[in-house]
Structures are given as structure tokens and as C-alpha cells.
Amino acid sequence: MRAGRVPDAERLFAAMSRRSTSTYNAMLGGYAANGRLTLALSFFRSIPRPDSFSYNTLLHALGVSSSLADARALFDEMPVKDSVSYNVMISSHANHGLVSLARHYFDLAPEKDAVSWNGMLAAYIRNGRIQEARDLFDSRTEWDAISWNALMAGYVQCSQIEEAQKMFNRMPQRDVVSWNTMVSGHARRGDMAEARRLFDVAPIRDVFTWTAVVSGYAQNGMLEEAKRVFDAMPEKNAVSWNAMMAAYVQRRMMEEAKELFDAMPCRNVASWNTMLTGYAQAGMLDEARAIFDMMPQKDAVSWAAMLAAYSQGGFSEETLQLFKEMGRCGEWVNRSAFACVLSTCADIAALECGMQLHSRLIKAGYGVGCFVGNALLAMYFKCGNMEEAHSAFEEMEERDIVSWNTMIAGYARHGFGKEALEVFDTMRKTSTKPDDITLVGVLAACSHSGLVEKGISYFYSMHRDFGVTAKPEHYTCMIDLLGRAGRLDEAVNLMKDMPFEPDSTMWGALLGASRIHRNSELGRNAAEKIFELEPENAGMYVLLSNIYASSGKWRDVDKMRLMMHERGVKKVPGFSWIEVQNKVHTFSVGDSVHPEREDIYGFLEDLDIRMKKAGYVSATDMVLHDVEEEEKEHMLKYHSEKLAVAYGILKIPPGRPIRVIKNLRVCRDCHTAFKYISAIEGRLIILRDSNRFHHFRDGSCSCGDYW
């Protein structure tokens, strides 16, 4: 079994005339060590008299494989539990970020050994809960140098270098790790003078001490000093070479990084990952992929880095394809990889793919932690499935500030202001303190739902009640809130009273309000300010043109078109996407390339007749061309979102929602049309545009026409 020769071990085991519990344990441990968890589980049930070692072996295997629910069930079943059992439960849950559950098992343990105490201390430190780590540390006195160093490193990680220094000064005995921690801590803070002073007075130095100084100079942009120390090192290891290479990567000096990489006598997987990440961050995806393909050995970080490169670069298809390849290679999917692919599913509204990922991450034991759990929440909200988002939130065994903020912002973007505020009220009853992002979500919820007075109340009380000082994002929400409600003068006065100059986003909110309430003068003033700040913002030219067109000011529309041409501003083309049977279909206005376009256009023609019988009238005042009404109607009929919705109705079985995503804001005509279509076809249509979500059902929209 230790040699990985599982079939040979099985044959030998089968040939034995007598077997002891130790024999069974050897097989059980072998299955676990060789990654045969399913066999280990079934084999465990065949052991005639399992002992504590048997239980602990399987318990550890379940914990390592992230099958935490199964681990908890086995733990509860154990007739006798020893310190090893409790320590396995502490470490397993701590490793997955479930610190409260780790503490639960720590408190249950009748006898705690050094492993228990250090395991719990490490759990707090690893998850950034430094005050709880300190409280635990202060509750006893028998700590060794490893524990002192761990807490000191925790303070460094949390940027509390003064507390780390106090620990360092109090230490009964310092080792080389203690000195390295303080050198790297001051370097991370940017205090290279103190880092170098400690380095010079350290009684003992090793290769990591030297490397800490190299990394410190590199991270603080002092490349020449870093190179000088690197060249002076009496001994270099892979970490040293990687630190110097990372210095070049951080400065986007990829040629120099490549030269160092080629000269390295001792490359490891981290060296390859550094180059891969560097190329990815520099936007050199072809070079990143070439490095990835040449790697003699890949780890979970390699796959996650390549996935992140594709995902952040907007290469959705490549991201999903690489993730499938990762599965075929049998590579263990870590939390970063899951988060990247969930983000990609969210970007393209690939709900079916996202739900399949949800199942996989639950099996991997990641579904209940914050890191992947938060990505899962965002995916469901961005795909328009609030019910699944709510369920995933309820299933999370631990929540952080990001979890609460994602729920509040998700409901807000869908226009469900009441639900967003209910989540906020629940959050306030927990130990999680609202931050500035929380209040942005709350104000946005009020804005999208027309809760004007509530929004005003929250805005003017947030510093007093929550210690949050209003930032530009909060003012933008308030300008949007007042503007949508038609209180344009109040919005303008608020902008004048701000402690900083308005930015383009604020003027954009005012321009949007001017469009809603057809105030062309205010709209023109807002647009002029935006053109000064962002002369290439095509959306604002189009928005002002819409205001002019709706008022019949065609000369002004022509002026805007001419201005765009003179300034080289190009209108962003509108696209819409819909996922059908795990495949994403993309449509543009008047699409002529989709293989089923004839069926789609035929269906839309028939639908248009039925809509007009029901009272639908095209919003021809939106067309930015002075042409005949009939031609305007034709131009509106084949917008990308209408084509996507029509295709969804044709292909998605009745009873299931039609989910469409658009890269721009939905136009007023399509918004009206979808209300009629939802009633005529009896379908729920969920449209995500660049600003928010719209849920069309039975002839009405969740936004209440307040968008």
C-alpha cells in the first residue's frame, strides 16, 4: 500500500487465512493514502471489530477529501473518541474556513493536547480572526516557540506590526523563524530601514532571512537593492530565485523575468506558476498558455492561475473548456478554481453550468464556506435565480461581510428592495458590522424600488448608526434615488453640497433621471459635464440623443451623431445572450447569422400581431432617426433582446423561466413588449441588462416601470 501497489495488497489480503484488526487497518489506511475514498468507505463497513485507529483513519480521510458532512456523521457514530478524533475534526473544519465548527469540536474535547491548542490557534490565525487567536493564546501559558511564531505571523498578516513587535519583544526564546517573521513583517509594511536593521543584527540567518529582504525590496519597488542582496546571497534556493523573479513580474518586466527563469538551476512548480501568473497579469495570454502547456508538473495553483487569466480576460468559452480539461486530468479542484468558473458562469448567465458546479463543490465540501459560497451567491443572482441564491445563503454554515453584502446588493439589483432591507435588518442582529459597501447596497435597493424616504433616512444616519462616512458611491446612489423620483432640484443641490467634485457616474445618474422625466435642458448640462470628463463615453451620447429624439428635436439628434463622428466615438453594439441546453446563444440587432433565424423571425412576426391585438404600441419616439413610423416599428421589432427571448420561448419547455442577458440597458420599447409577451405566452422572462434585472410576469415587471 505504501508503494501504491493497491491491487497487489488486495490479492495478498484476500489470500490471508486469518486477519487481525491491524490487518484491516493497514488496508483501510492504504486505500485512504492512495486516494481510494469510496473503497475505504465500503471497506470500513466490512471490518468486524473496528477500533479507534480504524475510525480515526477514515475520519482523517473524509476530512482531507472535504467530505465534512460524512466526517461529522462518522464522528457522531464513534463509540469511543480520543484526542486524535477531536484533533482531526478541528483541523478538517479549520482547513475549510469553518472556524466556528472547529471551535465547537475544540470545546467538546474532554482532554486537549498540544495539537488541539495549536490547531485551534492556527485556525483562528489562518482565517484572519486574530483577536480570537490572541484570546486563546492568553488563556494558557504553556506555549512553545512554534505557537509564539504563529501568533506573531498572524499579526503580521493582519498588518498589525506593532502587536507583532510586542510579541517578539516578549518571547522567552527566539529562533530563526522569529527573526524571519519580523524582517518580512516590516518589509511587507514598507519599512525597509527597520527590516534591514533587524536583518543586520539577527544572530542567526538562513536562506529565508536573505530571501525576506530580497522580497521586501522587490515588493517596495526597490529593484536595484533587491538584485544587490540577491547577488550577495551565500546560498540560494528555489524560493530565493522565485522571489527575485517575482520582483520582475510585479514590475511587468517579463523579459527580465524570463531571463532569470531560464537561468534558474532549481526550478519548481512555483517558478512556473510565477511566470504563468506574470504573463496572465500582463495580458499576454498566449505566452501564459504556452508556459502552462510546457509545465512538467502542474498543481492546483497552476490550473487556477490559468483559469483566472481566461476568466478575467473575458474568455468565457476558454475558461469553461479548461475547467473540463482539469476534470479529465483528475486534478483536484481548489476553491480558487471553483470561484473563477462560477464567476465566468455569472458573467455569461450560464445558469445550468453554474448549477452543475454547485453540485460538484458540495461534493468537494466547499459549498458551506465563505470563499466559494460567496461566489456561488453572486453567480445565482447574476443568473437571475434569487430562489437558489437564498437557499445557498441559508445553507452557508459561516457568513462574512461579503456574504451579507452580496445578498443585499443582489436583491437590490433585482428591484426587490423590501427583501434587501429585510436581509440588512437580519444582518444588524448578528455580530457582523455593516461597512460602506453594505450601505451602497442598501441605498441602491431604495433607489431601484422607489423607497425615497427610507433611502434619505439611511443616508443621513449611516455615520451616526454605523460609523460609515459617505463616499462618492453613496452620493451617486442618492442622486439616482432623488432623480428617479423626479426630485431633480434636490439631486442637483445634493451634488453642489458634496465635499468633493462630482464624477462622471454622478452626472450619468442625473442624465438618466433627465431622460426619465424628459428634462432636456438638465440632460444637456449633465451630458456636457460627462463629455468633459469622459469624451469617449458612447453611452452618454446615445442617452442624450434619446432625450432629444423623444422630444422630436431631430436637429439636436443629428448634432450628437456628428459630434460622435468628429470625436471618433463609436456606439457600443448591443448584444443579448441566452443559455439553452448548456450552450450560450448570442444575438445582435437584426441578427442574420443564427442557424434558426427563419423560425425566430417567423415567431416574432406572429407574436407582433398578437401583441398589437392586446394593445401594444411601439415606442417609435425612441428611434434615433427621422424616418416614417412604419420603418421605426420595423427597426424596433428585431432588437437583440427580442430575438433572444423569442428563441427562448421556442426552445425552453413551458414552465421554465426565460433568462436573457444584455450588455446595454434594455430599451423602453422592449421593456413594454416583454410585459405583453409574458402575459400572452404565460412565461416568466428574466432580463439582466447593464443596470439591473427585470422580472416580467403576467403583464407586469418587477421594477414597477421604475427604472
Image: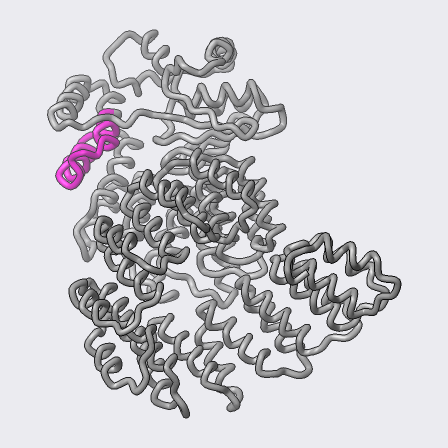
Figure coloring: one colour
Residue 248's place in the image compared with 662, above or below, is below
Outermost residue, right side: 17
Viewer-proximal residue, 558 or 261? 261
User: Is residue 310 among the parts visible in the rendering?
Assistant: yes
Q: Is residue 528 magenta?
A: yes
Horizontal side, residue 353 vs residue 220: left or right: right
Residue range (magenta): 520-545
From the top left corner, tell me how far across and down residue 543 is, in percent. 25, 29
Q: Please report the residue visible at 54 percent of the width from the left and 65 percent of the height from the top.
A: 95
Q: Main secondary structure of the magenta part?
A: helix
- The quadrant in which residue 436 appears is bottom left
Does the rendering let one see residue 680? no
**Front residue of this view, candidates 678 and 303:** 303
At a point 60% along the width and 68% down the height, the residue shown is 101
Q: Position of residue 551 (x, y in %)?
A: 24, 22
Q: Is residue 201 left or right of residue 396?
A: left
- Residue that lies at the very extreme toward the left in this rendered image: 566
Tell me where residue 45 sits by quadrant: bottom right
Foreground residue among 189 and 625:
189
Name which residue lies at 49% across and 86% down: 144
294 over 550 or under it: above or below:
below
Tell whether 112 sits left or right of 166.
right
Q: Which quarter of the image is occupied by the C terminus?
A: top left
- x, y (%) of residue 489? 23, 43
The quadrant of the image that shows the N terminus is bottom right
